């Protein structure tokens, strides 16, 4: 029987360097001969990309936090069924730019009282947890400036401002304490190359 693959997720505030680093990690693993599926949330599968457009565009008050939890979880369920679980069953490394922990933070923490709802719904709907989660830690004002300098209309969350990013940063650091076996923190305030080396070392050490 083929060995099941490994599931690595990246988390951190907007503009912390996740999208840059997932690509570099995927390229390094491929160079070593591994099969890699590089994907992202919200999105990944066709149905989940359609939900992505709904949640990331428009005014900040477009959806309540409760409705967002349902939309992100629906997108994640489709992504798991169609892409992530089949790739893991084929023995691939799956690298995902954001996953469950983003919902725990952005929806569960934003208003302070919805974390239990996120955890309960996740238990019901998302059977697979990541094997390793890398949190890129970053000063919110730098992350926010980097994120806002991109040309995109997917800015609903960035429009909540630096205050939200600070709360999310603290939340991600707290998650590393809550799940010490799964979640590792790296310092995002270094060159792209040095950060990529730190991440690769972490992955090698873990697997
Ligand atoms: P995220 O996916 O976390 O929002 P990105 O990887 O898209 O972050 O990076 C946001 C912006 O910052 C991009 O323009 C990217 O080129 C730049 N960037 C990424 N990593 C670094 C770094 N280590 N130092 C300086 N700029 C960076
Ligand atoms: P993403 O495209 O990864 O943005 P960035 O590259 O700026 O980090 O994600 C878009 C936004 O979606 C981001 O602000 C966080 C938000 N988000 C949630 O609120 N909940 C979730 O479950 C996920 C996956 C993302």
Image: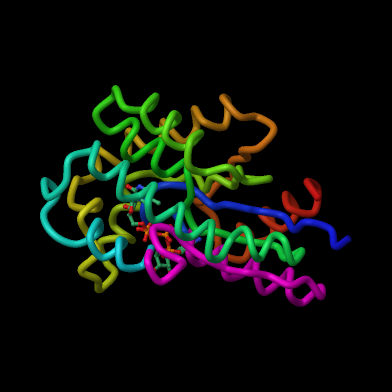
Q: Position of residue 180 (x, y in %)?
A: 65, 29
Residue at 78% x, 71% y is 34
Q: Position of residue 10 (x, y in %)?
A: 54, 52
Q: Does residue 28 show up magenta in the picture?
A: yes
Residue at 53% x, 65% y is 82
Q: Position of residue 205 (x, y in %)?
A: 81, 48
Left/right placement of residue 28 relative to residue 60 reads right
Please determine whether, in this image, residue 155 is positioned above or below residue 119: below
Q: Quadrant of ligand 1?
A: bottom left
Residue at 48% x, 49% y is 99
Left/right placement of residue 31 relative to residue 13 reads right
Task: Return the residue nearer the eye: 150 or 131.
Answer: 131
Q: Position of residue 65 (x, y in %)?
A: 23, 38
Residue 167's quadrant in the figure?
A: top left
How many numbered discs?
A: 0
Q: Does residue 7 show up magenta in the picture?
A: no
Please determine whether, in this image, residue 63 is positioned above or below residue 5: above
Q: How does the figure colour the protein chain or chains? A: rainbow
What range of the chain is rendered magenta?
A: 18-47
């Amino acid at each position: 029987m083929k060995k099941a693959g490994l599931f690595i997720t990246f988390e951190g505030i907007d503009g912390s360097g996740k999208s840059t680093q997932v690509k570099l990690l995927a390229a390094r693993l491929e160079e070593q001969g591994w099969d890699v599926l590089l994907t992202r949330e919200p999105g990944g599968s066709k149905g989940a990309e359609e939900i992505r457009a709904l949640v990331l565009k428009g005014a900040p008050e477009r959806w309540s936090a409760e409705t967002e939890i349902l939309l992100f979880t629906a997108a994640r369920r489709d992504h798991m069924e169609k892409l992530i679980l089949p790739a893991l069953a084929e023995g691939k490394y799956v690298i995902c730019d954001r996953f469950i922990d983003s919902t725990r933070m952005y929806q569960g923490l934003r208003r302070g009282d919805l974390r239990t709802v996120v955890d309960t719904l996740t238990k019901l709907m998302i059977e697979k947890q990541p094997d390793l989660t890398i949190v890129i830690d970053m000063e919110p004002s730098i992350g926010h400036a980097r994120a806002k300098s991109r040309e995109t209309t997917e800015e609903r969350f960035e429009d909540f401002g630096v205050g939200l990013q600070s709360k999310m940063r603290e939340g991600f650091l707290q998650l590393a304490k809550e799940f010490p076996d799964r979640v590792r923190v790296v310092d995002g305030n270094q060159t792209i190359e040095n950060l990529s080396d730190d991440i690769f070392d972490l992955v090698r050490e873990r697997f």
